[in-house]
Image (spheres, rainbow, N blue to C red):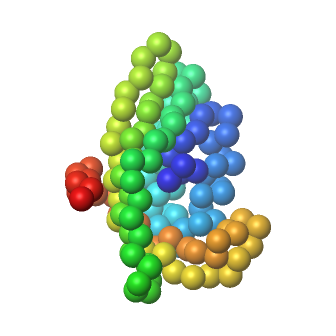
Amino acid sequence: MSLMHSHDAGNYNDRINAALKLVDKKVGARLYNRMKKGGILEHYTRFNSRTEIEVDSVVVDVSVEPYKGSIYTRQLYKYDTESQLIPIAADFEMIRTHRSEANPFGLLITNFDYKAYSPKPVR
């Protein structure tokens, strides 16, 4: 999430390219097209803006394969003297793959889907 949702005009391409190595091709194409359609890089350049991400929680069930998880985050969008907090949540699965310099944990994110931000209370 950090690579895909925390960047500025100067590091956008590097961070997106690094993130795309951690997701399967279907998920990568969908996320990349969504960001391109949204004009994210152009927005960063035009308004000298940036985003940061704060992870609220991540839950992963490793008792089944593929691993299943949920993540809840808040993206802080900063521009000029203003900022906006945007909640972002998603469900995903992870499969094992080969380890590499680009993917040192050997896990590939699949079936990544955004969802409504409504975290379950911790008991």
Quadrant holding the C terminus: bottom left
Residue 92 x/y as whole percent: 40, 69
Q: Which residue, as the protein is rendered here, is positioned at the far front? A: 123
| Residue 70 picture quarter | bottom left
Is 123 drawn above or below residue 13 in the view shown? below
Left or right for 52, reference 87: right
| Residue 104 picture quarter | bottom right
Q: Which residue, as the protein is rendered here, is positioned at the far top? A: 81
Left or right for 36, reference 100: left
Residue 83 x/y as whole percent: 41, 23
Q: Does any portion of residue 116 appear in the rendered image?
A: no
Pick the residue in front: 66 or 13.
66
Pick the residue in front: 7 or 105.
105
Pick the residue in front: 112 or 38.
112
How many marks the image carries: the answer is: 0
Pick the residue in front: 25 or 61.
61
Name the residue rendered at 59%, 62% in the picture: 20
| Residue 9 picture quarter | top right
Residue 3 x/y as whole percent: 58, 50
Name the residue rendered at 64%, 76% in the picture: 106
Residue 54 x/y as whole percent: 46, 42
Name the residue rendered at 50%, 46% in the picture: 5
Q: Does any portion of residue 58 appear in the rendered image?
A: yes
